[in-house]
Image (spheres, rainbow, N blue to C red):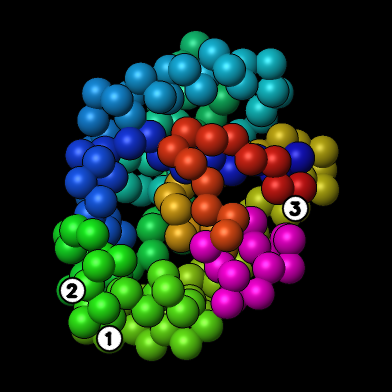
Amino acid sequence: MLYIMRHGRTDWNAEYRLQGGTDIPLNDEGRQMAREAAIKYKEIPLDICFVSPLQRARETADIFLEGRDIPVIVDDRLREMGFGISEGIDHIFQKPAYPAYSMFKDPAHYVPTDGAESFEELFQRTGEFLREVAEPLVKEGKNVLIVGHGAMNTSIINRYRNIPLKSFWETLCKNCELVRVL
């Protein structure tokens, strides 16, 4: 099986700020969410965990898997989508002048600018990770967990559910929600 989990909450989540590749830590609420998820999902057998290099995902994985003998492996391909100059902007849905606004409102026509990553780039790196790492393990019968981020996780979920780009955000996971993908 392939499972995916989004990191716990951060101060930037609470402030509705775009995080992207900015390395924001969990806040106390996010740590508590990870502890509660560990209890809620303790019966799900897991063999290995792959995690984004960003601290909010790594800390979520560490808390979630505490006391379980499950290796946690960092893979850079699981980092969050880069939002360029829009990182740190709050309430993006109220700011149509920012390039990231269209990423959320009209993903099929989003054109990244100023250091932002495209959906194609995101799909390429997450697809590579799935082909090279996750899918072979799942085929061996392993239960694989990926702990990552909103856009990155959504790209993986949408790949398997054949969700078109125009509907990209419809499968966005909540913080510390565990989703079975395969």
Percent coordinates x, y for residue 36 in the rendering: 47, 17
Dots 1, 3 in contact, CB < 8 A: no
Residue 178 lies within the magenta run: no
Mark 1 to mark 3 CA distance (whole Å): 35 Å
Q: Is residue 116 left or right of residue 12?
A: right
Dots 2, 1 in contact, CB < 8 A: yes
Of the numbered discs 2 and 1, the one sitting upstream in the chain is 2
- Indicate which label's residue lies in the foreground, 2 or 3: 2
The amino acid marked with disc number 1 is Thr
- Indicate which label's residue lies in the foreground, 1 or 3: 1
Mark 2 to mark 3 CA distance (whole Å): 36 Å
Percent coordinates x, y for residue 163 in the rendering: 68, 68
Q: Quadrant of the N terminus?
A: top right
Q: Is residue 83 left or right of residue 36?
A: left
x 48%, y 41%: residue? 174
Mark 2 to mark 1 CA distance (whole Å): 8 Å
Residue at which label 2 appears = 85
